[in-house]
Every structure is written in C-alpha cells, then in structure tokens.
Amino acid sequence: MYREGLILVREEESRMIPIARSLSFVMLVASLAYGAPEGTISGTVKDPTGAPFKGAFVQARNAKTKITVAVLSDKQGRYRAQNLPPGEYQVRATAIGYKEDSRSSVQLAAGKPASLDFALQKGMVHWSDLNTYQGRQLLPKTKNHDLSYQDTFFTSCFQSCHAFQKTMAPFSRDENGWRQRVRYMRDVIMGGEDSRLSDERVEDFVSYLTTAFGPNSPKPPSPADLPEYKSLVRSFSDEAMKIVYVEYEFAGSKGLGPWSAVEGNDGMIWIPYHGRGNEVVRLDPNTGELTRYPLPSAKTAGIHSAIPAPDGTVWFTEAEQGKIGHLNPRPKKILEYPNSLPDGRPAGSHTVRVDERGYVWTSGGPVISRFDPETKKFTHFDVGGTYGNTVGKNGEQWFTVFREDGPIVRITKNGEVSKFFPPTKGKPQRLQVDSDGVVWFSERRGGKIGRFDPKTETFQEFPLPGPSPSPYAIGIDRNHMIWYSSHEQDTLGRLNPKTGEVTEYPFPHSEISMREFFLDSQGRMWYGSTANDIIGYFIPPSGS
C-alpha cells in the first residue's frame, strides 16, 4: 500500500488518492518510511538593512508528500528545521509586510545538512494578513454601520464559524455577489433553518459586506495605510520563536472543514470533516495512509466532533442532522441514531465524548444527552446551551454552558447534576480535566483561563494578555502547561499555572480557527484548522 514518497488515501472502495503524510519531531516516522537518515535545513533571515530578522516563518514543504514544517527565526535571525526526510523541498521565508523569499527544488540528501539564507524586502500588508481583532478595529464604518454594528456583525458571523480573512478579504464582490454568498451560507451550509438569518438580516449583512469588501470600498489598499494600524501590531517573545508546526495539506479539496484530530488507543488519528467532506477520516501516522469513511447520506451533516472509543470504534456528531453516528472501521459500517426530544425538537449534537462505562455524551441544544449503546436509548438532562464536554474523574462528566453567565456543569456517575458559576461572567467554552481532577476551561468573552477544583469547589482565574484574547480551544501538555487558541488574536497561548505567566505564539496563517486540542501519546498537540483546510500538530517547546 505504500511507495516511497507517495502517501495514499484508501476510500471504502479502495480507490487510491495522493495525500500528504506527517513528519514527526518526537518520534521520527519519516525515517521509518524512507529507511534513510534524516536531514536538516538551517540558515539565517535578514531584514532589508541586513540586520537579523526575528519572527519570520521559514516553511519547508516536501515536494512529494506536500507536508509543510514551519519554524521561526530567532533574535539572531537563525532558524533550523530538522529531522526532515531526504528529497526535494520548496522552502520559503515569510513575514507580514514583507515580500516572500523562496527557494524551489532544494535537494536534501540523507543525513546531510542544507544551508539556506534569506533576505526579506519590504512589501505590502494585505487585509487578509490581519487577525480578527485587527479587522474589527480597521474595517470601514459607514453611516449605516458604525463600530457598534461592526461588533455585532463580527460577533454574529465570526463567533464560531469563520473569520473574514479567508472568506471575505481576498474578494471584491458587488451587492449581488455578496448576496449569493450569504444566501449560500444560510440555505446550504446552515440548511436554511437558522432563524438568526432572516431575509432582513441577510440584506443587512449584504449591505455591510458590499461596503467593506465591494468594488467601491472606502478602505485603503493596505491596512498599514491607516494611522491606527501600528498600535495594533503585536510582538512576540524570544521563547515564542521555539515552537514547531507540522501541517498536512489536503490538496485539491476546499471546504472540507477538518474540525479536529485525535489519537485513538491504537495510535490512529481520527478527523471529522465538518464542511463539504461529510466524512470521518482515519490517519495512520506510521504509514501515512488515510482512510475515508463517507456518511450514508449526501445531506450536509456538519460533523462537529469525533472521538475514538476504547473498543476501536468511533462516535461522532452530526450537528446539522441532529444525530450521533457510530463508525466501526471493521467491517466499515456506519450507524446513525437520531437524537430528538419528545416534542420532536432536536436534542443537540455538538461535542461528543465516551466515558469509562461506554456511555456516549453529547452537548449542544436544549439538553445534555447520554446514549447507551447497549439499549440504544437516550437519557436527557435538562441543562441547555452546553458547548464544551469532557470526561472527568470518578465517572464524572463535565460541560460548559456557553452564555455570558454560564456555569460549568458536573454530572456524576449516578446522574446528579451540579452547576458551578465562575466569578467572571466570561462565557465558558471548552474545558479539559487534568490528572488531578482539576477542571480547566476557556472563558471566551472574559479573556481568561479558569480553574475549578471539585474537591474544594473553588475557582481561580488567570487573565490573558492583550486586547480580546478570546480563548477557544484548550489543552494540557505533558508538563501540565495549559494551551489555548485565541479566536480573535489568531495566536496560540501557553499558561504556566504555577506562575501565571503566559507566552503567546504566532501561527503560520492569519486565521487560526482551532476548535479543539488533543494531546497524543508522543506529546504532540493535534489540531484542525477549518479555515485553512489543514490538520496538524505543534510541538510544545522543550522545557515548557
């Protein structure tokens, strides 16, 4: 099934498609496939004056596997991408406001280093380079759309689904063009049933989009031309330059929406396609083989979450269809279970987890749902508006209620429900439980990371730096550091819970769109980035 330099995707009918494979900096999967020593690409990056350039991304993309390894240049301008398999690479250095400097057909021999130096020249800052917060501040305000409306627009459109960098900033459409896109979002992506987008609201959005991204937009060619721009540019620490990203590229496919990536107990990585893919996908990181499991129906499922169970099967949610699904890789069988209330309303199919007894829990909708795979019956708990969902200690299940004054919720093994309200009305979103049973959660609106100790029933909150830090995904690494993604700053962050110190890390793309983090058995933190149609992992810097 595997040839050197070519990674294959197996569909249910065993049709083979080229796809990217993963490189690992922790356990060198690449060397197993190639059977040869790995190599290193290193060098320097300089600015237009010849001085060292700190914070440039240097990305090495394997020409055959189409995997990109991204590292950063340090304060001396030095960078180093190591443990690369031999082969041909495309290497480029990039930074916002500078022209890309690239090298094609870089041949990396087995066990030999390659040296490449880059010089970045001044270029243009594009609107698509901005993070979400910068866009909120800099995009045009009109007579009908002031900053207050713009905040409402960003909250409505960019709260969870996407930001403006990929879907709006690169395009200039007239009123009819934007109307087609907004209606497509409502009628196709949302299924036409989202009451938040009435015809009147659609037209209001169209009016704003035509102003901000139309052919006669009052915005200048570059946001850097605006006097407010400089005050919105963030800097990063020397420590932040140590992070490494490895990204899988799904060539030829757009809008798949890979929501997350999580390791099963057999080492396989499972990926839910929330967008047009309508599939659950399995990646074998040892061979690079990707197996696709299409859903039985062509209707948009909105696979919002997938989680492997101890028995090797996978449970997933179909947010748009109000179902949970069960995938058995052997013999490649998918079963679906509609989840509705007695009055016919959908019970919610958002985030899924499987507890130690094999019960399947889902958040979202007006209730929390627990599904018994043996009896095929749902039990509903009257706690509405839940979002985050995770397994705790002693058979406990934990949830967040995603509203300003929302609590975190515990359901015990016996079905007892308790609510605990954080000190800040921060709109808690995602949560995880550490090895001591302590609950960590992101406070999206409050700009904090929350800590709740179930033993003492006490809270501690850690404020995050900068304007609108908006933590979304949350993860805990091997060294008990707390990681989060910033939805509006489009960065990663790491909290040291012992000191309260926060380190922010840049991301190779302007829009981060990371929903969940999952730590694998090798210490890599996996993510999906829906806006960029990629999955990947980052390697927490040593000593973190």
Image: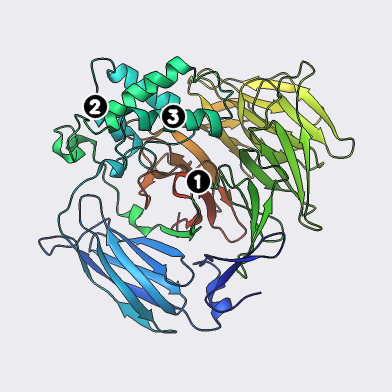
* Residue where numbered disc 3 is placed: 182
Considering every residue shown, the one lying at the far front of the view is 176
Residue 447 can be seen in this image? no
> Along the polypeptide, which appears first: circle 3 or circle 1?
3
Residue beneath the point at 22% across and 63% down? 76
Using the image, determine if residue 415 lies above or below residue 497. above
> Along the polypeptide, which appears first: circle 1 or circle 2?
2
Label 1 vs label 2, nearer the camera: 1
Q: Using the image as rendered, state which of residue 66 and residue 387 is in the foreground.
A: 66
Q: Secondary structure at mark 2?
A: loop
- Whole-angstrom CA distance, mark 1 to mark 2, is 28 Å
Task: Please state the horizontal and vertical placement of residue 165, each as a whole percent of the image.
Answer: 35, 40
Q: Secondary structure at mark 1?
A: loop
Label number found at residue 72: none
Q: Using the image as rendered, state which of residue 532 and residue 191 is in the foreground.
A: 191
Question: Which amino acid type is shown beneath numbered disc 2?
Answer: Pro
* Quarter placement of the N terminus: bottom right
